[in-house]
Image (cartoon, grey):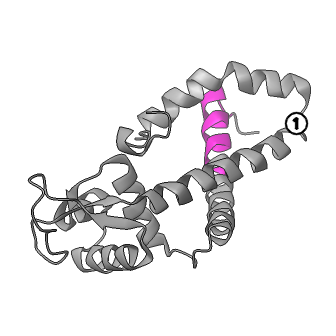
Amino acid sequence: MTYRSAQDNLLSALADLSEVFNLVNTRIRSEAEARLGQTPVPANEVSVLVLLLHQPDLPVTEIARSTSLPTSTVQQAVRSLLRRGMAIVTPADDGGPEPSPTASTTTFRASSLGAAVREEARQTAAKHLRYALSGVTTADQGHLIDAGDAIAALSAALGFQNVHEIYRQDS
């Protein structure tokens, strides 16, 4: 019999949970996009949009570095997000003309539609999770509630950042 430590069991459970969340996230995102009348957004564009929601006003080169996507892929994703209305060129500080979307110094941010798609996906995720929790014993729900702070700390350690304050509805 192979001995597995408590940490090994935890890591295995978290890896399983990660895989399930990835599958659920894809389904939830599709539902949210459909509710908002959006055609499905490819994964590369989702990566760019998520980054812009957390760190607005980035040029293509920084988006490519942060997402580990090739610059050409990021350029294509940004163009598509602009066409979809899910991203915008960062407005000029001086109120001057809008920078060209193809200039290397141009920066981008998510649009209000991009933020709305993300919020719809989060609300849909909460509904799915609430339903899933109904299949978990009351005792296990209590354990999950007790682990809430630890889960948040793990999310932060994995690099989670909340959306930038310019997208928060409560700001």
Residue under the point 61% across and 68% down:
33
Q: From the top left corner, tell me how far across and down residue 147 is, in percent.
A: 66, 23
Residue 136 vs residue 29, the one in the foreground? 29
Q: Does the stretch in magenta take in 26?
A: no
Vertical order, 153 against 2 (above or below): above
- Provide the residue span drawn in magenta: 4-16
Decide if residue 129 is on the left or right side of residue 113.
Answer: right
Tell me: 32 left or right of 71: right
Q: Tag 1's secondary structure?
A: loop
Residue at which label 1 appears: 136
- Is 98 rendered above or below residue 148? below
* Residue 6 colored in magenta in the image: yes
What secondary structure prevails in the magenta region? helix
Q: Quadrant of residue 84?
A: bottom left
Residue extending furthest toward the top: 146
In front: 23, or 2? 23
109 with respect to 13 (left or right): left
Residue, x 57% and y 24% (percent of image)? Answer: 150
Q: Residue at x 36, y 66 (%)?
A: 87
Q: Mark 1 belongs to which amino acid?
A: Val
Position of the N terminus, as image quadrant, is top right
Q: Kindly give the residue lying farthest to the front in the view shown.
A: 95
Is 41 located above or below residue 12 in the figure? Answer: below
